[in-house]
Each structure stands twice: as structure tokens, then as C-alpha cells.
Image (spheres, rainbow, N blue to C red):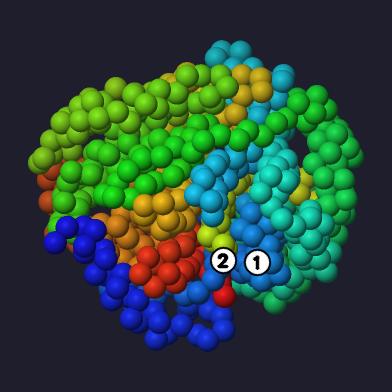
Amino acid sequence: MNVMHMRKAHLMWMAVAAVAALPAASSVAATAGVRNVIPARALDSGAPPATVTALAHDRPVLARHAMVVTSQHLATEVGLQILKEGGNAIDAAVAVGYALAVVHPCCGNIGGGGFMTIHLASGRNVFLDFREKAPLKATPTMYQNAAGNVVPGRSTKTWLSVGVPGTVMGLDAALHKYGTMSRQQVMAPAIRLARDGYVLDQGDVKILDTHITGYAKQEFARHPNVAAIFLNHGKPYVAGQRLRQPQLARTLELISRDGDRAFYRGPIARAVVAASRAHHGILSMKDFRDYTVQWADPVECSYRGFTVVSAPPPSSGGVTICEILQIIEPYPLSKWGYGSVMSIHYLAEAERRAFADRNSYLGDPAFVHNPISWLLSARHVTKLRASIRPDAATPSAEIKGNLSATEGTDTTSYSIVDRHGNAVAVTYTINYLFGLGQIAGDTGFFLNNEMDDFTSKPGAPNSFGLVQGKVNAIEPGKRPLSSMTPTLVLRGKRLFMVTGAPGGSTIISSVLESILNVVDFGMNMQQAVDAPRMHQQWYPEAVFVQPGLMRPSVKRRLMRMGYEFKQIKFWGADEAILVNPYTHLLEGANDRRSPAGLAAGY
């Protein structure tokens, strides 16, 4: 039985249970100096991954018409209400983007940037790049000292780390081009949540207080305007308390009234520039006036009869995922099984090679040539596949490549499908948890430290252990390379899956494995996002794995093949939707690593 037939049988079996379980009205959520670690601050805070045994009980949320999945339940409810009021998926995506800036302030944002991948009901696929840009005064050596050495913290903890934010212009551009509602309609819920506040759940508090002991108190308390909002009389918030953000509410009201002009040419920009100057930063009003978003065609590739539609440069995600998929497509992953020796071996080797290419060739298309056709060509992929040894790990030193810059893992991703067949995948970020950790004056929102995603110095490892190359060097007005990978999967011309995740360089593996878990391993959507993961990024040499991925016997055999492993408790909460082609029901899945999240539909 081939993979498509196996997947069809699996989906048809699920359909019987799905129809029986579907509520009549609406669905609700189901319960060389290269480091081998990812820094704790750069990891998102969530539950550990499920064991393989526990996965057997995982079931997605089901809905007939529309579905919203985000990392914060109130933002999901905002998006769902927009859809019920007649808005389309793009309207809901904009509303969710602003809502997450309020209720998920570590990661949701108006002070950062991101990507949006859209599938229109007409069949057209489009991509929107609203990634941050480097200030015009930025230089390639701005994070080095006089001796040419990278100064620790300069690209993450100072105002020199702030890129020109793109989120507001991106959301406004998407709404203007493909939305049906007014800006006032889609922003009203976020303004209300900021002004009136919302009651914190334990998942919200865990992020505010962070997974690093004392971080919130130590960092927030250093800045009075931050402490006034995110500490409760000097102490971390606890579950059940209400968080109000009146300053952010006023900022959002300005944007609602005046559009992106308020942010890029008005009082908001002036406040950010003034704070930057006061703290020895380099942002200027011209940086804000000159900022633009970019519409582009997504990267597309085929895999086992499906079409993957994903993010092009300056995202590295779409190209890297497509390269990995084409390397592994001839291998019988379904026969080998999830978590098997051969599946892990060939996936790790494909990732090792694709990440070396990613780090060597990809960057902002306005500044560098991205050889996408060559990277995804049969000739190149066949050559890479032929270099994989069937019984041994390949030392990364034997694979040519350059190291990339560090990326914060504290992005957030969300997925939306409406009743018309429009679908949106969004991933946006301020880089680390709470970005720079500072707010400009009384604007109420955290600013990014996205400049750290550039190469600080070729050959130097970033905070994720990626060795950096020249193609992603800092230049004025340039967008840093990103791993953010909001992705769609089509079956023929019809939507099959919407998926995306946070996690810095691990985003690529998370999104990839959410697809493989469904297509090759026959998982439902909830199982696919909850399943323990692996990640190999060329350097560091180790394969990152989550608990529960491998049986002890599998690990021992792989170690005899030359692998070394680094166990990471959790990373990257994937938020995904599957369209069952046989029942036409939507399967929504909030990753259990995001305890405050929710999948909901109607």
C-alpha cells in the first residue's frame, strides 16, 4: 500500500470517529567554541512534549466551517468572533495579530516583524514579508570592539539591537489588500483587552514570570515604565489577577484611527526614536518613514503528491524545508516508522546538508542573490542524497557551509481557515522573550532585539550555536535572515494543512515534522504537533532531541553510528490546522507546549 493510500485509509477511519464526535453547534478545545545548547532565555515556555504512549489519546478540535489556532486562548477567541461576524481569514489574522500583542506580550507584538503566507479561496497563494529592517546607520561591525571581537550582549541587550518594526505596516497591508472589514473593526477587540485588561491563566503567568528563575523580576524591575505594567506592585503576577495595559491601549487607538501612518510618521515613531537616542541607539525618523513591506510569491515544492507552500527569503524556512523533503522523498519513512533508527538517521543527515546550504546561500533578496532553483534542483538534491552513508553519521566538518546568525525562539505562530476556503499562516516575533525587554516611553509595547539575527562576525557562533557566514552580514536597510516558516500544504489545488511554529532555527524542524507526522506517519493533527521532535542544524554537531522520541535501543544504535545527542525538554509550539479531504472537517491543534493556547472553530 503506498503512502497516499495509507493516508487515505487513516483519514477515512478518522472521519467515522470525527463525525460521531462533532458537536452540533461548535467545537471547543480538547483537553570550535560552538555550543551544543540553546540558551534558556531563547526558548519558549511550555509543557514538555508528550510521550509516544500518550500520543495515542491525542485528538484534535473539530469544526465544520472555520478554525483558529493560536498560542493564547483569548486571541483565538478574538479571531473566531471575527469569522463568526462575517470576516474572512485575513480579517481574523489581523485581529489576532493585534490581540496577541496584548495577551501574549512576550512574543505577539507591534514592535517586531514577521511573515504571512496566504492561500486564497480562488486558488492563489501569496506571501507577505513584514520582517524588520536594519537602521540606516547600521554597519557590519557594529557589534564588535576595536579588536574585532564580538561584544557579548551588544546585539541583544542594548538599543543597538532594535530593528525597524514591520508588524503594523504588515497587518495594515494584508487587511487593505485581502480583508473585508475596517481597521477599526478588527482592532477593537485588542484595544478592549488592553484597556479593560484580562484575567491571567497559569500559562500566561508562566511566560510573564518566565521559565528562568527570577528573570521577570530582575529584568522588568530595571525599567520603571516596564515594571509599572508587567509587575504587580513590584511582584510577579499570579494566576487569577487582571493585567491592564492602558498605555498600549492608547497606542492601538492611534493606529486604529490613523493607520500605519501613526506608527511610522507620527507620535509612536517619535517616541521610539527619542528613546533610542536617549539610550545610545541609532534609530531615526527616516528609518520609520522609509520602511516598506514586500509582497512575493511563496516557495513551492512537491512531496509525495502534496504541494508545500512556504516562506521565501528573507525566510530560510521554505527553501530549507523543501530541500530536506526532496532529499528524503525516496526513502520509505512510513515503512520505517516514527522514531526509528532509519527515519532519524536520514532526517538528521538531510537536515545537516540543508542547513549548511541555508547558512551559506540565503539572505535578503534585496541585497543578495538566492539560488533557490539550484538548491532545489534534482541534480543538487541527488548529489546531497548520494553523500549520505547508510550506516553512519556524516561529520559536519565534511560538509561545506557557513554559519548563520542567532535567532530568538520566542516567536509566535498562528493558523486560520475560514468558511470560504481562505487560509492564513502567520509567524511574527520580537526575537527573545519580550525582545529587548524595554518599552519606549509610554507606548506600552516591547521592542525587538532582531538585529541579533544578522551575522555579527563571520565565523563566530550565535546564541543558537550556528556559525555565521557573510551572506547575512549587516547592511543599512537590510532584513536579517529568518527561520520563520508559516506554511501551507495543498492536496491538488485544495488546502490540506496550515502549520507554523516558533523556535529560532528549530522552527524549520518543527514545521517539517508536523508535515511528516501526518503524511508519512499517519498521525492526526494533534498528535503531529504534540509528538517529540528532533533537530540537526549542521553545527553544533549534536542532534537535539526531545524526551520520548527514541527508545533506548534506538539511541544506542544511532550512537554506534556516530551520533551524539543533546536532550532539550521543549521547543516550538506548533499551531496547526488540517482539512480532512474526505469529511471536509477541520482539525485544529494547539500544541501542548503552549498551555495558554487554544484551537477553536465553528
Q: Is residue 467 left or right of residue 243?
A: left
Q: Residue furthest front?
A: 122
Q: Is residue 332 visible?
A: yes
Residue in view at x 79 percent, y 53 percent: 183
Residue in view at x 55 percent, y 41 percent: 127
SS at mark 1? helix
- Seen from the viewer's position, the closer of residues 472 and 523 is 523
Query: For residue 271, what is the image quadrant?
Result: top right
Numbered tag placed on residue 83 in the rendering: 1
Residue 120 locus on image (x, y percent): 55, 51
Separation of residues labelled 2 and 1 (CA atoms): 8 Å
Q: Which residue is mark 2?
A: 419
Q: Is residue 465 visible?
A: no
Residue in view at x 45 percent, y 23 percent: 370
Residue 170 locus on image (x, y percent): 68, 42
Q: Please tell me whether residue 428 is drawn above or below residue 570 in the rendered image.
A: above
Mark 2 neighbour class, 10 Å CA radius: few under 14, some 14 to 19, many 20 or more: some
Q: Residue furthest left?
A: 391
- Seen from the viewer's position, the closer of residues 262 and 155 is 262
Residue 439 locus on image (x, y percent): 77, 45
Residue in view at x 44 percent, y 37 percent: 299
Q: Please tell me whether residue 29 is drawn above or below residue 368 in the rendered image.
A: below
As shown in the figure, which amino acid type bears the numbered disc 1? Answer: Leu
Residue 350 locus on image (x, y percent): 26, 39
Image quadrant where one finds the N terminus: bottom left
Disc 2 and disc 1 in contact, CB within 8 angstroms: yes
Mark 1 neighbour class, 10 Å CA radius: few under 14, some 14 to 19, many 20 or more: many
SS at mark 2? loop
As shown in the figure, which amino acid type bears the numbered disc 2? Answer: Arg
- Seen from the viewer's position, the closer of residues 53 and 387 is 387
Query: For residue 282, what is the image quadrant?
Result: top right
Q: Is residue 192 left or right of residue 381?
A: right
